[in-house]
Amino acid sequence: MDAITLLLDDHKMLRKLSEEFAETTEREIDTRKTLLDRFEIELKAHTTIEEELLYPAFIAATDDVEDKRRVAEGIEEHRVCDSKVIPDLHKGNPSTIAYSGQAKVLKDYIFHHLDEEEEDMFPKIRELIGRKELQELGEKMLARKKELLGELA
């Protein structure tokens, strides 16, 4: 599996989890907690392999300052989600309407980020990094993801 295919599979799963989470009701407190915990673990593994492996490979392959800005934006979006959006949900009361709003914002935030990567970054990476290199990168990313999921779960 190449690096982009691995990440696209992750994106599909993250969209599904965030959508399920956003569609829960104020009465589904345990479901909300379970989905948030699973989402957080999966997101952390995903963002880590991007930041440790994909983004550095992309930066090394490009001379375009806009590509480097895309990477910086992606890292910042990861940071905001990890340090603000998800912690706020953990602190919130899952039985409230306000929490429903926060869940919807998380979903919208994630969809926006994933769409940007898929539309702007991934095609450029495929253009710049050869098939063989993407395959090798994908193998490293998958191994690292399995390691992270073992640590985080």
Image (cartoon, rainbow, N blue to C red):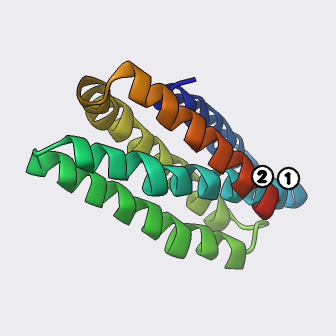
Q: Distance between the residues labelled 2 and 1?
A: 6 Å
Label 2's element?
Answer: helix
Residue placed under numbered mark 2 in the picture: 35
User: In this rendering, which labeled residue sits more in front, label 2 or label 1?
Assistant: 2
> Quick one: label 2, few (<14), some, or many (20+) residues within 10 Å?
some
Residue 107: where, in percent of width, then height? Answer: 54, 48
**Quarter where residue 130 is shown:** top left
For the point 56% across and 31% down, which residue is it? 6
- Amino acid type, label 2: Leu
For the point 49% across and 26% down, which residue is it? 135
Q: Tally the marks.
A: 2
Query: Quarter of the image containing the C terminus?
Result: bottom right
In the displayed structure, does residue 39 sit left or right of residue 150?
left
Residue 75: where, in percent of width, then height? Answer: 37, 61
**Quarter where residue 69 is shown:** bottom left
In the displayed structure, does residue 140 sit left or right of residue 42?
left
> Pointer 2 and pointer 1: residues touching (CB < 8 Å)?
yes
Residue 21: where, in percent of width, then height? Answer: 70, 48
For the point 27% across and 60% down, which residue is it? 72
For the point 52% across and 54% down, which residue is it? 47
Residue placed under numbered mark 1 in the picture: 31
> Quick one: label 1, few (<14), some, or many (20+) residues within 10 Å?
some
Query: Quarter of the image containing the N terminus?
Result: top right
- Amino acid type, label 1: Thr
**Quarter where residue 34 is shown:** bottom right
